[in-house]
Image: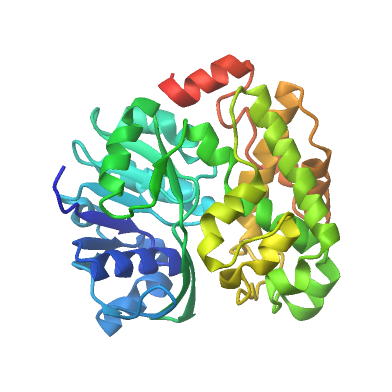
Amino acid sequence: MSEKPQVAVCGCGAAGSTLAAYLTCKGFKVNLYEHPDFAEKGLKPFQERGGIEVRGAVFNGFFTPNIMTTDIQEALDGVDIAMLTVPAYGHEKFAKTIIPNLQSGQIFLNWTSYWFCIRFSQMFKEKAPEDAILSEGRIYPFATRRLEPALIYTDALKAELMVAALPSKNTGVVLKLLQKLFLQAVAAANVLQTTLECYNVQATPAPTFLNVSWWEKTHGDIAFNEDLMTPGVGRVLEGQDKEKMAIGKALGLDLVPGLEITKRLYAHMGARGNTINEVERNTESAKVWRPRHELDDPTCLLAEDIPYGLAPLSSLGRMLGVPTPTIDALLHIASLVTRTDFWKIGLTVEKLGLAGMNAKQIVNYATEGR
């Protein structure tokens, strides 16, 4: 591992371009990759400008990565770590492209979790070099958005970045490298913790579907936290979080409550209060976010939070005998509103290869990789 890690950032949406620009700003050599299927919208604007323009509260300037390419072998050549920054519904396409092209000793890290390591562990065993490392982060480092095709606005850098590898014995290697890029990186117990504590899954579905009429009237042009978050909605979020915590308890995991996660991520951005509603509404970086998506838009954030977040929680809870009435209700309402059967298309214990396992076996699999 080099003292100055070289990085491949995979995915050129707001997340990937922000990450590539930030690490370039910090003096790291960064290769920016986009899958050819998405290059016209994702990568081409940056290629035409010759780089990435960034404004916002975290850093500002114009930054040119080492290379900007649709050739995955060129992107991965000589790097220490490849970071994936695409929505969960794009994970499979990118995993199938990246994993077989990894080089010996490279780390593959996905931001944000959504069961990534467990979902692709078998593919990694079969296709990646034996000494390559599979890992994931609990959540992506920035709050950011794309204002124009080649212009990014970054609202916040999160104050805690939790990561884990599969198997967990490799987490220390990942953390040692990642802390050279982000000092706030910390280790999770295993990839179950990074996945079950995924902040986005808690934060978005309930406010959306308890305010569906407002969302439909405005076509999503609303200040998400200020317009949709109320004490009643906050209590639904707390009910959902209690179900997550109960699943963790059934697995023998000491999970962090959602209220504490939010404070850890955004304390420096004003996140304070005694309830989820208070903390969400006090978080300065969240006040500016306006989704501007129709609910049935296939690129809407709910297209990952429902099928890759709530659906597997419900499935896992059912297998472990943990009731999840709040999560189930949100899944049902989301299916009705969007005319999408999330029970059918969402991740389940069967699709994750966990069906029939008891709690001890699931934790062993998430820790040992077998």
Nearest the viewer among 349 and 252 is: 252
Nearest the viewer among 295 and 193 is: 193
Q: Quadrant of residue 71?
A: bottom left
- Which residue lies at the image location 58% right of the left edge and 49% below the top edge? 261
State which quarter of the image contains the C terminus.
top left
Task: From the viewer's perspective, tell me whether residue 25 is left or right of residue 235.
Answer: left
- In the rendered image, residue 58, in percent from the top left (x then y), is placed at 40, 73
State which quarter of the image contains the N terminus.
top left
Nearest the viewer among 159 and 240 is: 159
Establish if 89 lies above or below 318.
below
**Res 160 visible:** yes
- In the rendered image, residue 286, in percent from the top left (x then y), is placed at 60, 69
Establish if 169 lies above or below 73.
above
Q: Quadrant of residue 269?
A: bottom right
- Which residue lies at the image location 52% right of the left edge and 56% below the top edge? 265
- Which residue lies at the image location 16% right of the left edge and 54% below the top edge? 4
**Res 335 visible:** no
Task: From the viewer's perspective, tell me whether residue 299 is left or right of residue 311.
Answer: left
Task: From the viewer's perspective, tell me whether residue 96 is left or right of residue 72.
Answer: right
Establish if 101 lies above or below 301.
above
- Which residue lies at the image location 28% right of the left edge and 77% below the top edge? 47
Q: How is the image coloured?
A: rainbow
- In the rendered image, residue 93, in percent from the top left (x then y), is placed at 44, 50
> How many numbered discs?
0
- In the rendered image, residue 13, in percent from the top left (x then y), is placed at 43, 67
